[in-house]
Structure formats: C-alpha cells, structure tokens
Amino acid sequence: MSLWVDQYRPRTLDDLHYHPELSARLRSLAASGDFPHMLFYGPSGAGKKTRIACTLRELFGPGVEKLKIDQRVFMTPSKRKLDVNIVQSNFHIEITPSDVGIYDRVVIQEILKEIAQTQQVDLSAKQRFKVVIINEADSLSRDAQAALRRTMEKYMSNMRVILCANSTSKLIAPIKSRCLLIRVAAPSPEEMGVALARVAKKEKFDLPDEAATQIVSDAAGNLRKAILILEALKMQSPDLTSNISVAKPDWETYCIKVADLILQEQSAQRVMLVRGKLYELLSHCIPPTTILKTIASHLVDRVDESLKADIMHWAAFYEVRMCTGSKKIFHLEAWVVKVMSLYKHFFYGIDMPDDFEI
Amino acid sequence: MLPKSTKIAPARPTARSKAKAKTSTLTFETPPSSGSKKPVKLLSQPIFSLPSSQETSREGSVQIENRKGKQRAQSPVDDQLWVDKYEPQTAEDLAVHKRKVEDVRKWLGEAFDSSPGSTKRRKYRRILALTGPAGTGKTVTIRVLAKEMNVQVVEWQNSVDGGAIGDQDFDRESFSSKFQAFLSRATTYSTLTFDSPTTSTAPPTPSLLQPLSNNHIILIEDFPNVAHAGTRDAFHTALRSFLASELSCPLVLVISDAGLRGEVADEAGTAQGRRLRDEVLSIRNVVPPELVQVGLVTEIEFNPVAITLLRRAINSIVEAHFTASNPHLPPSKEAIDMVVQSANGDIRSALMTLQFACIVDLPGSGGAKRGKGGKLSKRAKAEATRGILASITQREQSLVLFHLLGKLLYNKRFGDDPEEKEEWPPELPGSLPPHLAHHERRPSKVDPNALYGDSPIDTSLLSLYLHQNYTQYCDEMDECEAISDWLSIADTFGGTGDLWPHQSTLAPYAFQTLTRGVLHSLPTPVARRNQKIFKPEFFDHLRKTRDAEGVVADVVAWIEGTSGVRWGEDEVSTELGGVLKFVDGAPRSHVAFTHLPYSLNPSRMEQLDEQDAAALGDTAAEERPEGTHGVGQGTGEVQIAEDREREWLSDDDIGEF
C-alpha cells in the first residue's frame, strides 16, 4: 500500500484546486508549443513536484504516467562505475543529483547529451522535445550547474529542462536567467483544509473540523506534512472525534527540550549536555539547518524582545559557517554557546562588549 | 594436469625471485637448516616450489662467504636485516599478546580438527582475517603457529611481470583466473616438498592428486588492487567460490589496515566520504561484508605491540646480537627506551631503527667502557642519543598527543607563578590601544609553530579533540564562546564549500588559527580541577549517522517501490516519522531515524589513555571499534558513574610536560 500523499496526488492541472492563476498559466504554456526551460521553486510541501507532473501530463498526455525505472551505469573520469536508478517515461526523464554525490556533473552531462542527441521517434507524440526533470536542483554542485548552462542553450531544439528547488539562492545566476521562474507558494490554511477534506472523502470517513484545524495549524503550510499527519492520526484513533492531540515527530519535541536546556542554565557543563543532544539529533539524520531553525524559533518565542534579533542574527551567521565548514556540530555548538552567553549577560544586566558587527 | 599448469606458470624467474636468489647468496652465518624455517614463497602455482634447490644454493653461498670472511679478518659485516635474522621461532618469542596468539592457535586448531562432529564448525573455520596496524606481528604469528603445528604456509603473491609487453610468447592470464586457479590448486595439491620431514619417511611417490587439506595454510598478504571495483568483485567471487568448495585447508588473510584519520573526507559530503572509504585497504572491502556478518570469516584484530612486550623483545635481540665476540657495543638503555617509545607499537619499525642506529656507536653505549662516553653527563648523553635517533627516525614520540593537548589546554604563560624566576621574552614595542585592551595577554610559553611541526595528528582531528575537551578548562561562558567560535572558524578552512577551492594549502593556517585562537581565549592560568582528556564522541555519532542514512535510503526505496514517487531524503527523515510507525510493510529499521527518546543522562565519554595516544601516531585509533559505547540511555546514572571511574586514569597531570 502506498501513502495517502502519493495515492491521492492530483494528476491533472484541473485537479489542482489552489493557485488557479498558476495552473491556467501552465496550461496555456503547455498549449502554446513554445515551452521554455522552467525552474519551480517554493517551500517544501507546497506542491512543486505535483505541479510538474500535472504540467507534463498536459504536455504529453497520459503517456507520461507510464514510468519505468532503469538502472544505468555511468563511468566517471577516474573510471569508476556508478550505478544510478533513473525514472523515465517515453517523454521525460527524472534525475536526483544527490544520488550520485560529487559525480553529479558527469551524470547530468551524460544524460542531457543522450536525450539531446536523440530525436523523438514516436510520431504520435504531442511535442518534439523531451523533458529532463532535475529534482533538488539546489543541491547541484557548482560544476554541474556550470555544465548545465551550456547544454541548456545548445540543445534547446529537442530538450527542455525543468528544475525543482526549495530556493533559488543556491543556483547560479546564468541558470536562473535561462529559466522561466515559477514560484509555488505554500497553500493557505483554507486551501489545506480543502485538500484534507478531499482526502478524507476519498478514504470515506468524516474529518471533524477541529481535527482539520489542528492538523493545518501544525503543518504550517506544508501540505505533504498535513496529509501525513492525517494518515498517522487516522491510524492512531480511527474515529478522530475525541480531542486528539497531534503528536509532533520525536525530533521536534527533542529540539524544544534542547531549547529549554539552553535557557535553564548557562554553564560549561550545560554546553556538554546540549552537545550530546545535538549529536543525537544529527545522528538521526535531521538536517543541521533544520535543527538550527527549529531550536532558534523556539528560543525566540521564549526570550525578551531585545534578544530576539541577536539570536536570529547569530543563527544565520553560523548557518553560513556550517555550509562552508565540514563539522556541523562545531557550528551548531558555537551558536548555542553564543546564545547562552547572550542570555546570561542579558540576565545579569551586564553590557555586552561591542563585538556584534562582524 | 601437470603440463597444463606448466603452460600457465611464468616460465622465467620473476624479478622477485631474482631478488630472493640474490639475498640468499649474500646470506652469511645462517645455519643451513633455516631453509625449513622459512616457508616457501610461491609465485602463482604451488607445485613448482623447490625448496631443495634453494637449499643447495644457500650451501654454496656459505662457502663463498666463508672465503670472503677470511679476507676481511674477523670483522664480519652482517648485512641481513635484524627483522629477518631474529624472526621469532616459537610462540614464546612472539611480541604479541598471549591472548591473541591463543585466539589464532585455537582457530587454527579448530580449522584442522578433522574429528567427526567438528565438520559443522569447520565450515566456519575457513577464512581467518588478521587485521591491525603494520608491524604488530600478524604474519609472523601465523608462520610460527604453522611451524608449531607442522603445517606449511603457501603464500600468494601478485606477479610483478607486468612490464614484459614485448614478450609475446608469455601467456598472459587475467588476474582473476590466475587467482582462482591458485586457490583451487593450493587447496588440492601439496607442494613438492622433497626435504620436508613428512615426505622423507613417506613413500617416494607422494600421490599428487590426493587432497592434502590437513597440512597447509594458504596465506594472502599481497592483496590485489581492491580499490578497483572490477578486481575487487573478482577477488570476492574467488573467496566465495573458495567457501563453496568442499572442506579443505584454511585461508588466512593478513590485512594491515591503514585506517582512516579524522580528515575532511571522512565526514564531508556523505557520498564522497563513502567513496573514499572504498579505497582504503581494510576488512570492509577485502572481504565481502555479508561473509563477515554470517561468521564465515573470522576476524582477529591485532593491537599495536605494548611497550613492555616491545622492550622485552628488543632487549632479547640486543642480547643475542651483541655477544662477546661482537666488536660493537650494545646501545645504551636510554637509546633502547627511545626506540621503543618512538615506534608507536610497530615492532618492525623499532627493529629497523635500532639496527640503523647501531651502525655507528651511539654516544653512551657501553657506559664507562668507553672513556669518552663516561665523561658526558647523563643528560647530555640522553640529548645526544635523542638527536641521533631523531635524525634516524622521523616518527614522533608517542606521547605527543597528550603533550600537545596539555600544552594547548593548560595555556601556560609567563608570570603564571609569581615566584618563578624565568626570563620573559623581549616585549613587543608599544601596547594595545584602549579599545583592544581586553585582548592584552601575558606572553605565552607555547610556540604554535613548533607544535605544528610536531603534531602527530592533523588539524581536523586536533580540532575534534579540543572541541571534546575545552569546556572543562573554561571558567566563564565568554571563554567558551570565544573558543567555540574559533573552532567554527578553523573548521571553515577545511570545509568542502565552494569558498576555498584549494583547501589543502589552508591546513597550516587552520592549525595556527585554531591553536592561537584557543590559547588566546582560555583563562590564564587555567584552574586545576583534575581535568581529564576524553576522546571525541564525534566518530561514534558519525557511525550512527551513517547507519541511519542507510535506513533512510531504504525507506526512500520502499516508497519508490510502492508508489513510484521519489521522496527526498530530508523529507523522509523529518516528516515521515509519525506515519511510518503505523504503516504496514515499511522497513522496520526506520526507528534508527524516527525514534528519538529524550533523556537527561549525559552521553558517556571515553577517556584518552596512553595506549590510544601511542596508537594515534600513524593509525587512527578512533576508527577502531572500541567496544560498544552507545549513549547510556537505558543505563542509570550510577552505572555511568562507575564506568567513568574505571575509565579514568589515576591522577596524571599532563600539564606538567
């Protein structure tokens, strides 16, 4: 059995019930025959991938849904063999660069060249070009991005690229300028409520309003998360009527407790304790930026107004360090210690030394 | 059968065997009987080893040497390496821990145990992997035990005839088929041992086709290039088919693992790190992992030779070498101590150093017998010896990790002790302007430049050690804040970001930034609170992270399999936690990343001890599995406290170095 999120994913642009202008625009683009390269961006769970899939269907018809998974072997310059799973249909191909690590440039170049050099042989096909979807485009290495920009221009005649990213900030400018940027914003709470009701209707149960409200507020604009929570709740208590409590994932509760630890005491011993917790979070595959963000937002809720700006400033500061450096724990801990120090000085009313600006 | 192998076998002697022949002509004073002591090294086929011919050539060489010896009067020049000359002959001579020897002996005993009822166990006694750093006596243990059990050692060597391109008549065979053939032949046939005691009493025609599984061991030390995926697969296939074949002689793999160090590649971009890992020779890639898991391959891990064992071994060799007839004087006790200290548990290196050092007489050797030596003060003598040894061996002294951390963390500065009458270094001109006055420090006694030269570990690993331990040495949050910030800065120097494309050139700067930053930030003098130095927890957690990543990948694959939709790994690890618990069919192992119970127990830390510090010299101790020391979730506080008591060293003030 598959998850509800995947099972009840809208298939066509008409099924999409929010951002109607965006859907209309995509539909007319697909009809115009002059389809550009595109870059979909927006927060996670806003429906980027769904929209891409719908657009493809609009372009090529239901044939794109016939997927096959190929195992391909690529040869790196150092003669190492890479096995990569590639999802493709007759009309498009999907790549996730993080699968291949540092060799993303090789793999992307190979695939793009191959697609670009073959003509569409299916005469009944609606379009002459094939589409290459690159997921998680913001994790593409600089090399790969640079390699991409030339290919995008050169093989325009029989290939289009659709990139999908959370934010455009990690993409180089030449790529951004070659794409039509399409922002998929997070759905509003009402829109999410509609989506949840739709899932409930298809699963044939009644979703009480209170439960829906709670789920929506907890998911914070992430529709995928909302449907996942709904599924988890439904399995936990099938009636959904009694006052249910939306259980946060373990790691989120954990982050809140870490934030508590930071505010309770500021000492070297406490630093060690918090470090242990951070290590635990990291070893459960929680992305370090997510850890930083979650703890920071909980801290900010709890401290004096004058400290909030500083806490966020240093969180941003150390997040950049984290991207440059390699040992995530150092930067997370440096931020924790910084916050402890700020809080302690604030608590004892001592003036901060003026080393804020760096 | 026989002619076929003749065709396969390289017809001419390889470079290696030439070299061997040369050594044997130079052999001097070796009793002829040593031919039986040395197991015969075979090239690619065991059938054609003829130890008897070697025997004769050796006898011939002894005659020649004797004549030479007369010409040179009684000053024999012994150019055999001590390592070979004084190779241990009995299990008692081995400088290996008794228990390890016993483990290996037990294994071999079980492997050769042909009594009925042991067949089942023998199935699990086919492949033995000896792992451990270089020079810890892995190979010699096997040789000695084989001798003790009266079995032969048949060894595989990669052929070195790759250069013969123009040699058309030479039959080139791929590595894998050669190796497969070697394994099957070596398991089936005995060597043509004309001089072995067993065959001398046996009928003159030993049946070649009779499986002789009970009298030899196959030894593989010279591994094929396992970093190359194709060769590795071939090697793994050969091992698997060896296991699948009927019961026969045991196979021993000797793996000198190079180990990984706490370098950027270890923890950087996961895929990159994983790929680099494949290239290191270790049990993880030499042997197919599933064989280790089901117990078909036994691993016995050798640790660096303990100081006491090493000293005993060296002393006995020195005694054997510097007999009364030897005109040279034995090295002094201090010199031996220094050699032992600098060897980092590598007995081969220790012997090499010692032999090289004894080519000239060391100052102070023989004590008062030499008038010159007696006049020097003890300290000066030690200094001189140290100087000579330092020029011979560039290996760092083993306690350096303790020194290094102690020097940095205790942050000694001039004027710490007002009683002290040491001369301050000349002051720098001028003083800091008022707005920088809080950066004013007394001159430091630590010289980061010297430390950089002597550091036994790289900057990345040093930063992990400092990170693990700095909090104990701080009094105020401000100091913690400054140090953690310096650690963070130094880490960006070695990162994988796009900011600095040539990170290797930044290593010295990272070290300077790190050490000077830490020295500047620590209080002075550091309060003595009986601080202990702990090993970084980092690697433990890194391992757990890797495991969890594997599980996340499994879940991604599962979702892709059921619904054809590909999820991102971060989405799975952060959002899917709640649902997975209830979904049927999901991989059960998902708890590795979804289950995160909160407990207030501090994580257990392991203290750095001298053994580890010694081992850190050239291998990474932190990569060795140190037993299981997960976070003490289930254990109560009391248990942890006890563990800690046991792990701490007795009061040993590393700051005093």
Image (tube, coloured by chain):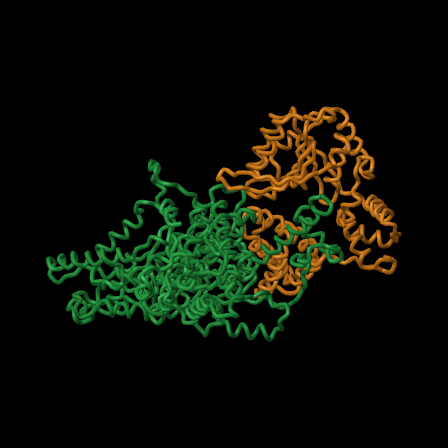
Chain colours: A orange, B green
Residue B610, image x, y percentages: 42, 67
- The one nearer the camera, B470 or B458, is B458
Q: What residue is rendered at 69% in x and 46% in y?
A: B567
B108 with respect to B564 (left or right): left
Q: What residue is rendered at 37% in x and 70% in y?
A: B419
Q: How many marks?
A: 0
Residue B632, image x, y percentages: 60, 68
In this rendering, does residue B402 appear at all? Answer: no
- The one nearer the camera, B64 or A96, is B64
- The one nearer the camera, A313 or A253, is A253
- The one nearer the camera, A203 or B584, is B584
Where B118 falls versus A215 (above or below)? below
Residue B59, image x, y percentages: 20, 59
B191 with respect to B244 (left or right): left
Residue B146, image x, y percentages: 38, 65
Where A316 falls versus B304 (above or below)? above
In this rendering, does residue A101 appear at all? Answer: yes
A74 with respect to A227 (left or right): left
Q: What residue is rendered at 60% in x and 49% in y?
A: A319
